Amino acid sequence: MKNTIVSMLFVATALSSVPALAADPTAAAVAMVEKGAAYMQKNGKDALIKEVNAKNPEFINDTTYLTVRALDGTQLAHPTNPKLVGKNMVVLPDADGKLFRKEIIDQAQSKGKGWVDYRYNNPANGNIEKKSTYFFKQGDVILEAGIYKGK
């Protein structure tokens, strides 16, 4: 009887944490980058770039989306702003003057993966908000997924 109660409590605790993980935007950003890395590993860089630019629903959702950047800073794929593709905006700062793109590239080359925080225009509401981007260097590109965190 005691084992049954302990087992039931364990299952209830495990199940109650699943929605919290699913609702965690940071976990969603990491998962998006990992999904992109797996796709690139299987299908190649060019295929991933094509799918991201085509707005494949695998790489864009309500929480985040995947982008692909070359190590020199050139944007190779962006599902929500195609005007950025082919542009290198490393020298353009965020709302506070931070060169966040350069920081992403530098950290990707030195650490391989991580997070960079900055302030950026949220296209959903037009406000400057805190944003965090998770990045992962794979080969000669950086896969990125960001999340907005409000003012």
Image: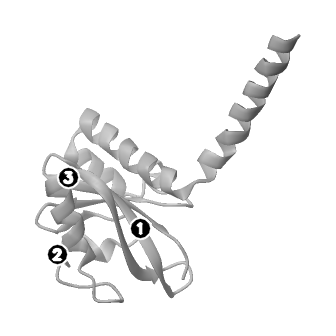
Q: Are marks 3 and 1 in contact (CB under 8 Å)?
A: no
Q: Residue at x 53, y 72 (%)?
A: 149
Dot 3: within a 10 Å radius of its alpha carbon, few (fewer than 14), some, or many (20 or more) residues? few
Quarter of image, res 44: top left
> Which quadrant of the figure contains the C terminus?
bottom right
Q: Position of residue 23 (x, y in %)?
A: 62, 53
Tag nearer the camera, 1 or 2: 1
Q: Position of 61 compared to 59: left or right?
A: right
Q: Residue at x 20, y 79 (%)?
A: 89
Q: Amino acid at mark 1?
A: Ser
**Disc 1 to disc 2, C-alpha distance:** 20 Å
Q: Amino acid at mark 2?
A: Asn
> Which quadrant of the figure contains the N terminus?
top right
Q: Position of residue 11 (x, y in %)?
A: 74, 26
Q: Position of 11 compared to 71: left or right?
A: right
| Callout 1: SS | strand
Quarter of image, res 98: bottom left
Q: Amino acid at mark 3?
A: Lys
Q: Which residue is mark 3?
A: 111
Tag nearer the camera, 3 or 2: 3
113 and 79: which is toward the camera: 113
Q: Are marks 1 and 2 in contact (CB under 8 Å)?
A: no
| Callout 2: SS | loop
View extreme (right): residue: 1
Question: Between disc 3 and disc 2, whose residue precedes?
Answer: 2
Question: Between disc 3 and disc 1, whose residue precedes?
Answer: 3
| Callout 3: SS | helix
Q: Which residue is mark 1?
A: 132
Q: Which residue is mark 2?
A: 88
**Disc 3 to disc 1, C-alpha distance:** 17 Å
Q: Position of residue 70 (x, y in %)?
A: 16, 61
Q: Is residue 136 visible?
A: no
